[in-house]
Amino acid sequence: MNDSANPLTRMADAGETIARLARLDACAVSDALDAMGLPGAALGLTALAAPRRIAGRAVTVDLIDDAPGATHAGRHLGTAAVDASGPGDVIVVAHRGRTHVAGWGGVLSAGAKRNGVEGVVVHGACRDVDEARELDLPLYATRGVPVTARGRVVERAWNVPVDIADVPVYPGDLVIADASGVVFVPAAHADEVLATAEAIAAKERAMVQRVRAGHPMAAVMSTDYETMLDREGAC
């Protein structure tokens, strides 16, 4: 058996990938995706609870309106994803931008915290935000709302491709979120995106060192900065 076929090797590789992602920030990753011509930044989402950086693999949940004839999972939304998730996972809820009803709540937050989930991202509103804060569970969403999902929204499926603020997200894609926003990285491009983001972050650290050393801002942020995302300049 070669190393790539060994489950333990794959787990170690996945852990190192997430560790590399966690050492970056959302801006550097977004810049790397820009340099590669890939979408990634999910606009309009912000930290509502435990506002710290999170990084991990996407475990997706797709929600639809609870309408007559709607095909749905037949269980409360998000429960299967919570039960299947743990450290290294970020639960990503495709609530399709709804802000009049919650797509996530306090009992789900308790389950996610119990299982060691890195955090939760909801494209739309969520509720029981105070409970997520008390649990110290990072929760990124569009806004808080007190209105229950019961009788209004149901889970169509979980661990399926979804759309988050016009960004396609597949199960296992990478997620990073911090005070600047939420960014998704296609798993198929993870190594190249991370390498590009690491190079960008290194260049910016060097620039900050020049600022601290007293160099004029115009010299630090020269033409090189404007072209930093060019394909040849980003790597």
Image: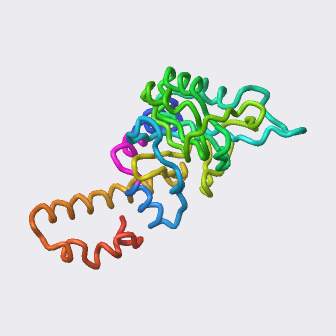
At horizontal 21% and vertical 64% (from top left) the residue drawn is: 207
At horizontal 39% and vertical 69% (from top left) the residue drawn is: 229
Residue 105, position in %: x, y?
A: 60, 30
Q: Is residue 84 left or right of residue 23?
A: right
Q: Nearer the viewer, residue 69 or 176?
A: 69
At horizontal 20% and vertical 61% (from top left) the residue drawn is: 208
Q: Magenta includes 22? A: yes
Q: How is the image coloured?
A: rainbow
Q: Nearer the viewer, residue 124 or 40?
A: 124
Residue 196, position in %: x, y?
A: 38, 59
Farthest-out residue, right: 69
State the extent of the magenta-drawn residues as a range.
Answer: 17-26
At horizontal 65% and vertical 37% (from top left) the residue drawn is: 103
Farthest-out residue, left: 213
Quarter in which the C terminus is drawn = bottom left
Quadrant assignment, res 204: bottom left
Q: Is residue 39 left or right of residue 214?
A: right
Q: Is residue 112 left or right of residue 149?
A: left
Quadrant assignment, res 22: top left
Farthest-out residue, top: 114
Quadrant assignment, res 15: top left
Residue 149, position in %: x, y?
A: 70, 34
Q: Is residue 155 above or below residue 98?
A: above
